[in-house]
Amino acid sequence: MNLLVSVRSAEEAVAALAGGATLIDVKEPDRGSLGRADAEVIAAVLRTVAGRRPVSAALGELADDREPDFFLLNYAKWGLAGWLRQADWPDHLLHAAGSLPPSCRPVAVAYADWRRAAAPHPADVCAFATHSKWGAFLIDTWRKDGTTLLNWLTLDELRHFRDRCRAAGIPIALAGSLSEEQLRLLRPLQPDWFAVRGAVCRGGQRTQTIDEGRVRRLVELLAEPIRAAIPTS
């Protein structure tokens, strides 16, 4: 299992790298769950990482209808808030992905709180990702209000998504205001990545700066052996 850390600056990327993050994601948390950072910030993070780790970027909501800037990213993703009643969202998502450079893999994002985001159901987005053989499937929360992934989806539901992705050979990432407590509960699912920001920021607040020590603590947690549950008689 790997740790994806979302950063909002080159300085935060330095802290995330020093703490052992295996994937650096660029976003602007003041602009929403998948808030798009300014082009200058994305470029600065890429220069700082300098190929030492893969870099992804949040490109906002698909409804923003803005062409992506050309960057040598490894992954890029859009949110689907507002697309619930538009049956042609897969076509629009494929069109957006077609504007990415060949080296950049698109990520299909499902919102666990899909109803209040007016987004497609996570099962539909997962089916799209596995059928289209996209670069990865991410489950996140749309509104950052103190609720977490596990307030919206059960472990059994998440296990189902993991199994579908694994059968299709698609990496899966779990996000959604995950704290150390939630990571402990979710670790047995063994997704390809856990994606965090608030959990590795000072004071546990996603609008604060990345804390290298918090990153290192979660990296160490994910490296711990997963002990099987003791059967009961």
Image (tube, rainbow, N blue to C red):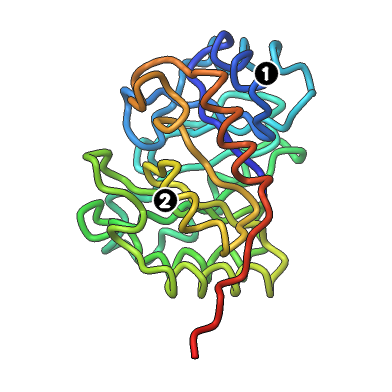
In the shown orientation, is residue 143 left or right of residue 155? left
Distance, label 2 to label 1, CA atoms, is 23 Å
Residue 127 visible, this angle: yes
Q: Residue at x 59, y 15 (%)?
A: 15
Name the spot of residue 181 as percent of width and height, x first. Answer: 41, 47
Looking at the image, residue 183 lies above or below residue 202: below
Secondary structure under tag 2 reads: helix
Front in this rendered view, residue 2 or 32: 2
In the shown orientation, is residue 99 left or right of residue 29? right
- The residue under label 1 is which amino acid type? Ala
Front in this rendered view, residue 233 or 225: 233
Name the spot of residue 164 as percent of width and height, x first. Answer: 59, 74
Q: Which residue does the numbered mark 1 point to in the structure image? A: 18
- The residue under label 2 is which amino acid type? Gln
**What crowding class fits label 2: few (fewer than 14 Cα within 10 Å), some (14-19), or many (20 or more)?**
some
Q: Residue at x 64, y 59 (%)?
A: 226
Secondary structure under tag 1 reads: helix
Name the spot of residue 6 as percent of width and height, x first. Answer: 51, 29
Q: Residue at x 28, y 56 (%)?
A: 113
Give the mark nearer the N terminus: 2 vs 1.
1
Q: Which residue does the numbered mark 2 point to in the structure image? A: 182
**What crowding class fits label 1: few (fewer than 14 Cα within 10 Å), some (14-19), or many (20 or more)?**
some
Looking at the image, residue 90 lies above or below residue 27: below
Q: Residue at x 72, y 66 (%)?
A: 169
Residue lying farthest to the bottom in this orientation? 233
Q: Picture quarter containing residue 202? A: top left
Residue 93 visible, this angle: no
